[in-house]
Amino acid sequence: MDIIDCRDYFGKKVKNLKEKKLFLFDLDGTIYEENCLFEGVLELLDKIKKRHGQYVFITNNSSKSVNDYILKTNQMGLKTNYDNFFTSAQATVLYIKKNYPGAKVYCQGTKSLIREIADAGIEVTETVEKDVDLVLVGFDTELTSQKLRNTCEILQRDIPFIATNPDLRCPVSFGFIPDCGSICKMIEAATGKKPFYIGKPKPMIIQTVCEKYNCRKEETVVIGDRLYTDIASGINADVMTVAVLTGEATAEEIENGDIKPTYTFHSIKEMCQCL
């Protein structure tokens, strides 16, 4: 396919994509599905490197630490390091340190998330304690009824309630499972308390990565499968956005909805052909 004649899923002529220097990819539903890497990913990342570009995975999925993501992606054949990731957990650490310095955090999340919070120098607990200053909920793939009970008990107090990300569902091999947003809706129904969400669609993750790599918004593109987080975050950061149809978003939702990506491709493989 000639780049001059390349068109997206809806027949829109693709312009300026090959000029981008910073490619910000979502993971679940965009790069892979659970442990299965999508076709075309390795080829696309290789093209980006050959063009002297940079790719970073900006995921809302807080169930894994960056070290866990490095291990997972390396096992899939991707050569990644710490600089290739910026997650909602990392964004949450920055938010807590800026807005609640010295706070003791109760965290309802995976062992991996709790370890990452603690490794950042934040005091964190998984139990009901009187001196907790802040409640944090993440995408917890190890969720138990006791964890929910603890969270609801602590939220009877008048203390801040934050969550790593607002995603309602996470794509898996058979469809979807409840993500952090759905877990928080359950807690909200029980306590009447609604969290302040940290990750996408807020533009902070994108802005932070752009600053790190000294890239202007005109040089940046966000690629993802979810409209209300991935694509909305790019729009909020005023950068080019690409939606792929391998995860949550459907062509019908894009065509009929209010959140419009710059371009839409069926998959990463099709996007690669336009680079």
Image (spheres, helix red, strand yellow):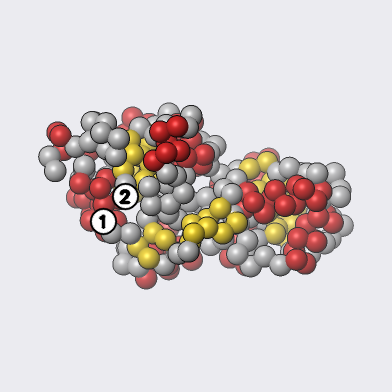
Residue at x 38%, y 47% (from the top left corner): 245
Mark 2 secondary-structure assignment:
loop
**Residue 5, image x, y percentages:** 15, 34
Q: Earlier in the sequence, mark 1 or mark 2?
A: 1
- Inspect this view and state whether residue 176 appears: yes
Crowding around mark 1 (Cα neighbors within 10 Å: few <14, some 14 to 19, many 20+) is some
Residue at x 14%, y 33% (from the top left corner): 4
Residue at x 77%, y 67% (from the top left corner): 146
- Inspect this view and state whether residue 123 appears: no
Quadrant in the rendering for residue 199: top right
- Say which of marks 1 and 2 sits in front: 2
In the rendered structure, are the residues bearing label 1 and label 2 in contact, judged by CB atoms less than 8 Å apart? yes
Amino acid beneath label 2: Ser
Left or right placement of residue 33 versus residue 202 in this view: left
**Residue 113, image x, y percentages:** 60, 61
Quadrant in the rendering for residue 7: top left
**Residue 11, image x, y percentages:** 25, 33
Amino acid beneath label 1: Gly
Residue at x 60%, y 45% (from the top left corner): 166
Mark 1 secondary-structure assignment:
loop
- Residue lying at the far bottom in this picture: please name it: 75
In which quadrant of the rendered image does the C terminus lie?
A: top left
Left or right placement of residue 51 versus residue 74 in this view: left
Q: Return the residue at label 2.
A: 267
- Residue lying at the far left in this picture: please name it: 2
Q: Return the residue at label 1.
A: 40
**Residue 103, image x, y percentages:** 74, 50
